[in-house]
Amino acid sequence: MSSLFNDYQPESFFDEVFSKSGKARPHYEAMLDSVGSLTPSEYSARQKAVDAAFLRQGVTFTVYGDDQGTERIFPFDLMPRIIPQREWETVEAGLIQRITALNLFLNDIYHGQKIIADKAVPSELVLSASHYRPEFRGIKVPHGIYIHICGTDLVRDGKGDYYVLEDNGRCPSGASYMLENRNAMKRAFPGLLQQLPVRPVDAYGSMLRETLAHLAPSGVLDPVIVVLTPGIYNSAYFEHCYLAKQMGVPIVEGRDLILRNDRVFMRTTKGLQQVHVIYRRIDDDFLDPLVFRKDSLLGVPGIINAYRKGHVALANSIGTGVADDKAVYALVPKMIKYYLDQDPILPNVTTHLGVDPKECAYILDNLDKLVVKAVNESGGYGMLMGPHASKKERAEFGERIRKNPRNYIAQPVLQLSRHPVFVDDHFEGRHIDLRPYVLCGDRVRVVPGGLTRVALKKGSLVVNSSQGGGSKDTWVLWDDPLTMPAETTPAA
Amino acid sequence: MLSRVADSIYWMARYVERAENLSRLLLSTQDLLLDAGAEGVDEAQFWQPLLATTGDEEAYSKLHKKIKGKDVTEFLALRADNPNSMLNSIRAARENARTVRDQISDEIWESLNSLRLFVESAEGKTMHRLQSAAFYERVLRGSYQFQGIADSTTPRGEIWHFLRLGTCLERADKMSRLLDTCSGLSLELPPHAQARPLRWAALLRSCSAWHAFQAHHRRLDPSKIIGYLLLDETFPRSIACCVAEAQAALQSLCDDAGLQGMPAPLRHVGRLRADLAYTTVEEVLATGLHEYIDDLQARLNQIGEAIFQTFVQHAELSQLPEDALVETTSASGAYHAHADEDLQVQQQQQQQQ
């Protein structure tokens, strides 16, 4: 094996590349041979070339805090994470099962609420979710699909078993980095990608477009699709633009849209043009000042009414946040049982609900051992990493939990799997997770791989970009190139 | 195309051209000072017209009491608190590009993003301090690169026409201001063919017209120079040429949009082009160069305003029947400086999971 990995220590964690005995796992062998033939300085030169390209191309996210909004590149580690076919097939089946149940749940909650009537889930827990929109009950949405684009976070524990950590069913982000990471790898290691049967991801743009087109009002054969962005100051503006370009559709802001006769139009140089499907990256609350927050500067007055009447479709739908509430998350295995009569293929992480007095007491007694999360936060905000927190931080968090127990859940600290990451001139193990992207249109499709996120700080378990996280390209390796599914090759 | 996108593309091109013109001015003024050579020259005399061209005399005087080369160049090139500085023009060009990056080629975006990274970098600041000419040349090259890339990667549709409009109207405006700074100079013919009235020579150089002009004229006859830069449609930086190109772009845009009759921007630009074509330099000088340019600038502004009204604001939108219930949102437009704080905060609040 190469010198680059000579001093590498998997330690006591589950390492994606090396088994406990220090031997490379079979699906990593070819890559290690190739990467291993490089000297540290050669490897480092490729890494720097990719970083420089990302900066020049503006493949960045915005860090809030100063008035200009600093743009940073999303740190990218060149060594790809590899998932063998057999593992991927299980993950894919588990994700499809899960999103199917979540959409059935949302359709039920916004119509008959049978799951509640049958007491399969506790009513107050579901209906108290802050993203539940009672005013949307009884509104028909196209094909009964609520979450069209989902970014599910998966982790592996010390034994290498996959778990679902959370479902992101409102505005999941990061798909653009998945695509750009692959492009960067094509330039950095062209030979390797040619030699290995890695499933391509570049069909994501056309898959997303098909998913959105599926929602168009009936009778519209060639729907006008747009991406609705909050604007250039949003952290994910790059992604909004990138996806619009991949799909070949316009990116619009609220002020570009206008309502006429309950139909949505965009202002163009040639007058008004009707819009049929909107991939919106704006929170529910800001979408329509006539219905939700009156002070919204980003929304489109009247758009909700147009949606109710079926003249325009929104992706994702309104009120999907009730399904990715971190307390409702704990109920997903029950939903899978209730709607599909199946056992979950991908298990949940054990979750203690603050809303349950007994479990709340357990949480408060064990703050030093648990991860506590606010139920509606994302991006690594609003969480307490118990074992790493100070006494004072734990006391403060305990106070918050007592004040609003419904708003918190706690989970045991998982020893997330690790992957080698290049640090200065050698490799060190860092914790990772995996975010695959799931699209629900006429059928459910999962992009092979997804975004592997890395906690770049030594010992850290938080992978979010806002908290010092980075990413890796993710390769789903197919055993036989001839059997590789065809739907992932881009349309001509 | 979205109206906001059209406006952003138009302003992206204008801001690049603005930065380019400023570079040219700074370079030629530095050269002029070197040519003037003799010690004891009053630098202020050379730098003052520059501030006048960019219309920044007042803003400058708030920061500095005296007009000094070092202060003026820094003010015009790199001051973040001067909204018209080269730095801010390049930033604005890049921010507009960012809002339309799905519409323009990756190469255009990368060229503007790289240029912005350069002017904001420590390397750029050091270069400006130690070797300002090299810095200006780098910005000039950035602008040429932008135009070359735009030319070779942009389909000849709406985007292209708005790009050309922005470039031509900005160039015409800046040329008119440049000519205006010379309106107080003597129009006397130089005593012999070799004599070089420095200011007139610098004027030609600052718009890359030195060789082109000399190919036609032996002597640096001031009135011929004015005629050349104002009325000669063959020279790409002359006002007449810019107006002719703007007219062609507007004609295509109006045809594409299927606008009936004679839309306002086309009427204004056509009339201006005809005036420039049928006016002689003697007539301009009889009116007075300064007065002529004053009127010209007002007409250029009128064209810009008409473009905004027709393609962005949509004067005709108001004629559509409007639902009583529905409020209209504010009009779309390009990026010019910081967005208002509330908007920025709300944009940032939107959760991206």
Image (spheres, coloured by chain):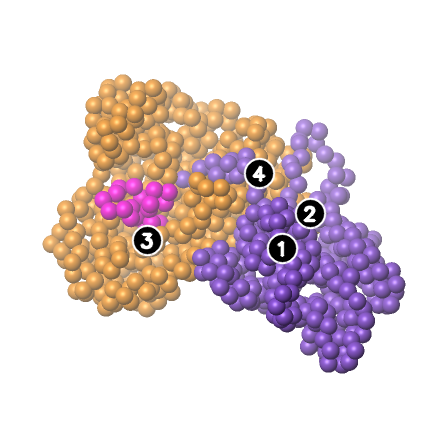
Return the mark for residue B67: 1
For the residues beneath circles 2 and 3, the answer to whether they share a chain is no
Chain identity for the colour purple used in the image? B
Of marks 1 and 4, which one's residue comes earlier in the chain? Answer: 1
Label 2 amino acid? Val
Secondary element at tag 4: loop
Whether A454 is among the magenta residues is yes
Residue beneath disc 2: B312
Secondary element at tag 1: loop
Q: Please, which chain is the residue tagged with disc 4 on?
A: B
Query: How far across and down, in percent of the image, does residue B236 sit?
Result: 70, 69
Q: Say which quarter of the image contains residue A131.
A: top left
Of marks 4 and 2, which one's residue comes earlier in the chain? Answer: 2
Q: How far apart in space, not on screen, are marks 3 and 1 (Cα)? A: 54 Å
Left or right of A261 on screen, residue B146: left
- The N terminus of chain A lies in which quarter of the figure? bottom left
Label 3 amino acid? Lys
Secondary element at tag 3: strand
For the residues beneath circles 4 and 2, the answer to whether they share a chain is yes
Q: How far apart in space, not on screen, are marks 2 and 3 (Cα)? A: 42 Å
